[in-house]
Amino acid sequence: MSARISRQNWQALLGELDDARRQKHLVTYRALIERLDLPAPAMQTLTSALEYLAALDAQADRPLRSALVISQSASRLPRTGFFDCVTRLGRFAGASDGLAAASWHAAEVARVFEFEYPADV
């Protein structure tokens, strides 16, 4: 799965995630799609962008900003694909649901909230 995001939408995504980080809150996939006004296939575009961002953060040994994006479901966790991605990146090992995923996610979100990202990424 791969979809391209425009430079303008990429910068807007980084801005939304930075705002969420500074305010110490999470944002849903749906809210991001609406705020960024992503064209169809919006979820695929957003997912690809978040996976790319996770790879960039992992490569630079930074906390994963994509952890700030969660599902609207009662779990308040990212979608299963997020956990597949972070497993591929070597950041998480385990089932994408349950206590291990929730604990890892909570710890990663705390790391993101505390980290100061360079202005150019």
Image (tube, rainbow, N blue to C red):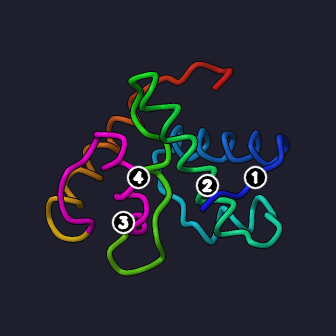
Q: Nearer the viewer, mark 3 or mark 2?
A: 2
| Residue at point 49%, 37% (across, down) | 55
Q: Are marks 1 and 2 in contact (CB under 8 Å)?
A: yes
Q: Amino acid at mark 1?
A: Arg
Disc 3 from disc 1: Cα separation:
24 Å
| Residue at point 46%, 71% (across, down) | 71
**Picture disc at residue 48:** 2
- The disc, 1 or 2, on the residue closer to the chain's N-terminal end is 1
- Nearest the eye: 55 or 101: 55
Q: Which residue is mark 4?
A: 85
Disc 1 from disc 4: Cα separation:
17 Å
- Asked if residue 75 is positioned above or below residue 67 in the image, the reply reads below
Q: Is residue 97 left or right of residue 31?
A: left
Quarter of the picture containing the N terminus is: bottom right
- The disc, 1 or 4, on the residue closer to the chain's N-terminal end is 1
Disc 3 from disc 2: Cα separation:
18 Å
Q: Which residue is mark 1?
A: 4
**Picture disc at residue 77:** 3
Q: Secondary structure at mark 2?
A: helix
- The disc, 3 or 2, on the residue closer to the chain's N-terminal end is 2
**Magenta stretch contains residue 86:** yes
Disc 1 from disc 2: Cα separation:
7 Å
Q: Where are the magenta residues, as a range? A: 77-96
Q: Is residue 97 left or right of residue 70?
A: left
Disc 4 from disc 2: Cα separation:
10 Å
Q: Secondary structure at mark 3?
A: loop
